[in-house]
Each structure stands twice: as structure tokens, then as C-alpha cells.
Image (cartoon, helix red, strand yellow):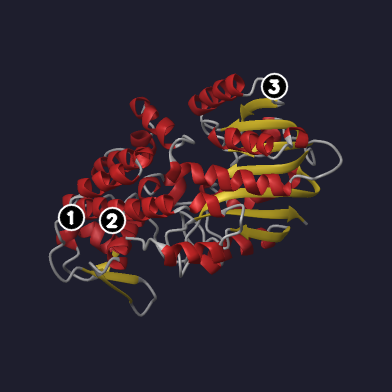
């Protein structure tokens, strides 16, 4: 659980820039800690119901333990490694590297009985607006056994038509645990937009249901800079998300210079009508980490930008490179999340990247002047719950 009170408040005052500090009030930080504990308890339940608790009595790698539990050898190793790593981080398993550097796990005793519902009740008292994240995590926990056993893919399970409502609630700016990503990103875009020379063209990748776009337009209006954007191209790969996002934004911002269209960031941007050197800023909120080939996607982004144009991301990040984080629990079910093309040394695994890995990857792909705010490297020891940041860079 996170510490609260004057000591934590003083740390946040010292470590966070003034424009970000209001986003990290005591209630939000406490909600992050509660959700982390909720996910840990869900993970214990998944480990128990999938047979991993019994299989982990004998020391072995995540893949070996998954095989002993009879789980699918293609889909299960990465999520199982995350589950076991999360329990190890909580002191419930032991972990060590073998002579080849492969992590081994062993469960020395019975897992404790820890009811997730008690944490959900505490969250309801603290801030019920965060409960959409809990409902989505609970749904994911129920899907884990079938996905790990190879009965269904995570994509089919998580994005079934009857689950669209849960995603709408989760991605909403009314859900503080997700909205913070949109608001951090909006502040970073507003900082990156030129102060003179008229409005610029912006391309948003993976716009989803439009909540990041809405937060950005609200920020520009609040800052007195509605004309800083001349044209805004909202894109998304999933047709159902694109349609809903497009309708919601058109209704809410009828005067905004909005265009919408489908764009697959794993394909050449020219297929979506994006001309080379046609935009001054590319924006994405919790999007680029699921690129199948991040090196390719960064090259496409660089090509779309004018010389000196900006790339602004808002991303969940791993405070430390090998540390599993609670936000990954739901998304580890997705093939696109857990199994991208790897690039040594800055893309060593699927899932979220660390700040250092983002910096190294951007520099390797032709960007410069990488700025990370909030600075996770300064925050991660004092405020480990902070796993959200903006990453801004300039086309070199």
C-alpha cells in the first residue's frame, strides 16, 4: 500500500513539475496502490485456478512451470512469467537465475488466501470513479484460464462485442486511473506545439475511443491556444473504436479541425494517406508499445514528420527494466502486447518499456532531445506507484 500524508506530499512537491503536481494528489496515488494490490490478489487467484501453484512447487523456468501445469506452450510462457514475477516481487515466490541467465521460480509454501473484493470495497470508499479499471481486471482474470490453456486467443476474449462497454468505461476521462495518461499527454503536447507561426498539423496514432483527443482539446482551450492546431488527424486500427471515437469527438468538438481515418501502425503510413513530411507532431497515448515492430513504426513516424517535428507519447512504463507492473495484467493476454519483434538492447521483451529503453530506442531510430516528464528515474524509488509518463522527442 502507498504511504500517504505529509511525507508523501512533500516528496511529490519536490519531484514533480508544477503543471503535473495536481494530477498526483493523495487520492490518486492511494488509488494506484490499491489497484496494484487488487491486481496482485487477482494474480494469486489465477495462479491457483490454472494449476500453476502446484506446478511451481518444483523449481523451474516460467515455460517449464507452465508446461507442468498443462498450459499452452505458445501463449502461456510470457503471461506465466509475469504472474510468477509479480508474486515473487510480493515475497510469495522465490526467484533466481540459472547458469544461462534464465529466471527460475519456486513456491516454498501455500499461497495465502487474499480476497480481491476487500480491496475493491476500499477503492469504492477512496474514489469509486476508479472502479472501471477494477471491473476490466476482474474480467481479464476470469479469461486467463482459457487463454493460457489455448482455448481462445486474448484478442478474441478481451474484445468480444459484449465487452465493448467495459473498454468504453475504462478508457474514459471519468476513470482517474486511465485519464491521467491522457492529461499527462495533453500537457506534453501543449508544451511541444510551436508558440508562433500559426497552427500545425497533428497526427494521432491509436486514438481508441477519443478520450486522449478530448483531453488535448480541453487542455488547449484552457491554455488559450485553440488555434495551435491547424489540422488534427485522428486514427485508429479497430473499426468499432474508430467509429465511436469519431462520433464522440464530432459531437463534442464540432468546430475542431478534425479528420478521422483508419491507420495500422504496423503497415506503411502511406497506405493510410499519410504523406512524407506532412505533419509537425505525431501523438500517441499508450499505443506504441504494442507496435509489432517498433523500429519500423518509429521509422514511419519519422518519415511522416517535417524536419524538426515532434513525437509525443504518453506511456505506461516499467520503472525498472525487469520489473513487472500491475498495469500489464490485462494486456498480457494479448499477443500484440507480449510478443513483438525484439531489438537488442532497447526492446528486450514484450509489454511496457522502461524510460531508459524508450530513450535508447528513440535515439537509435533517428530522434533527439528526448524528454521524459514526470522523470520516472527520479520518482521510481520514492513513488513506485508512478508508472505513467510522457516521452517527447524531435525528429533528428
Residue 270 image point, x, y percent:
71, 35
Q: Quadrant of the C terminus?
A: bottom right
Disc 3 vs disc 1: which is toward the camera?
Answer: 3
Residue 167 marker: none
Q: Which residue is mark 1?
A: 114
**How far is mark 2 from mark 1, CA to CA?**
9 Å
Q: How far apart are the two marked residues, 3 and 2, measured between alpha carbons? A: 45 Å
Residue at horizontal 64 percent and vertical 43 percent from the top: 283
Disc on the earlier residue, 2 or 1: 2
The residue where tag 2 is placed is 40
Badge 2 element: helix
Figure quadrant of residue 161 = top left
Which sits in the foreground, 143 or 247?
247
- Residue 361: x, y in percent? 62, 60
Q: Quadrant of residue 57?
A: bottom left
Image quarter where the N terminus lies is bottom left
Q: Residue at position x 69%, y 44% from top?
A: 190
Name the residue carrying label 3. Answer: 255
Residue 149 in view here: no
Amino acid at each position: 500500500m502507498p504511504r500517504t500524508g505529509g511525507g508523501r506530499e512533500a516528496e511529490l512537491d519536490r519531484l514533480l513539475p508544477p503543471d503535473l503536481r495536481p494530477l498526483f494528489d493523495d487520492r490518486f496515488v492511494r488509488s494506484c496502490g490499491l489497484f496494484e494490490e487488487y491486481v496482485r490478489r487477482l494474480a494469486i487467484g489465477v495462479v491457483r485456478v490454472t494449476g500453476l501453484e502446484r506446478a511451481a512447487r518444483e523449481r523451474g523456468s516460467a515455460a517449464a512451470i507452465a508446461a507442468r501445469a498443462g498450459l499452452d506452450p505458445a501463449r502461456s510462457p510470457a503471461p506465466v512469467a509475469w504472474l510468477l514475477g509479480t508474486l515473487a516481487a510480493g515475497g510469495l515466490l522465490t526467484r533466481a537465475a540459472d547458469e544461462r541467465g534464465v529466471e527460475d521460480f519456486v513456491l516454498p509454501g501455500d499461497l495465502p488466501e487474499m480476497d480481491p473484493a476487500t480491496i475493491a470495497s476500499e477503492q469504492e470508499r477512496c474514489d469509486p470513479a476508479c472502479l472501471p479499471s477494477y471491473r476490466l481486471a476482474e474480467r481479464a482474470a476470469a479469461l486467463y484460464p482459457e487463454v493460457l490453456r489455448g482455448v481462445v486467443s486474448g484478442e478474441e476474449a478481451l474484445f468480444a462485442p459484449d465487452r465493448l462497454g467495459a473498454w468504453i468505461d475504462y478508457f474514459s476521462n471519468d476513470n482517474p486511473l486511465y485519464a491521467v495518461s491522457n492529461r499527462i499527454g495533453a500537457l506534453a503536447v501543449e508544451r511541444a506545439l510551436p508558440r508562433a507561426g500559426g497552427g500545425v498539423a497533428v497526427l494521432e496514432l491509436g486514438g481508441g475511443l477519443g478520450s486522449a483527443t478530448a483531453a488535448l482539446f480541453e487542455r488547449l482551450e484552457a491554455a488559450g491556444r485553440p488555434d495551435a492546431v491547424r489540422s488534427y488527424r485522428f486514427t485508429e486500427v479497430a473499426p468499432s473504436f474508430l467509429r465511436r471515437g469519431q462520433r464522440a469527438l464530432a459531437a463534442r468538438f464540432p468546430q475542431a479541425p478534425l479528420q478521422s481515418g483508419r491507420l495500422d501502425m504496423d503497415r506503411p503510413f502511406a497506405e493510410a494517406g499519410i504523406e512524407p513530411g506532412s505533419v509537425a507532431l505525431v501523438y500517441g497515448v499508450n499505443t506504441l508499445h504494442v507496435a509489432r515492430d517498433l523500429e519500423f513504426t518509429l521509422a514511419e513516424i519519422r518519415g511522416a514528420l517535417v524536419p524538426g517535428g515532434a513525437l509525443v507519447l504518453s506511456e505506461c512504463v516499467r520503472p525498472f527494466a525487469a520489473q513487472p507492473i500491475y498495469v500489464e495484467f490485462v494486456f498480457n493476454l494479448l499477443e500484440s502486447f507480449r510478443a513483438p519483434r525484439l531489438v537488442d538492447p532497447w526492446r528486450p521483451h514484450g509489454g511496457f518499456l522502461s524510460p531508459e529503453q524508450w530513450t535508447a530506442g528513440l535515439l537509435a531510430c533517428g530522434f533527439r532531445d528526448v524528454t521524459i516528464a514526470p522523470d520516472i528515474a527520479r520518482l521510481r524509488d520514492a513513488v513506485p506507484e508512478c508508472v505513467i509518463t510522457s516521452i517527447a522527442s524531435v525528429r533528428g
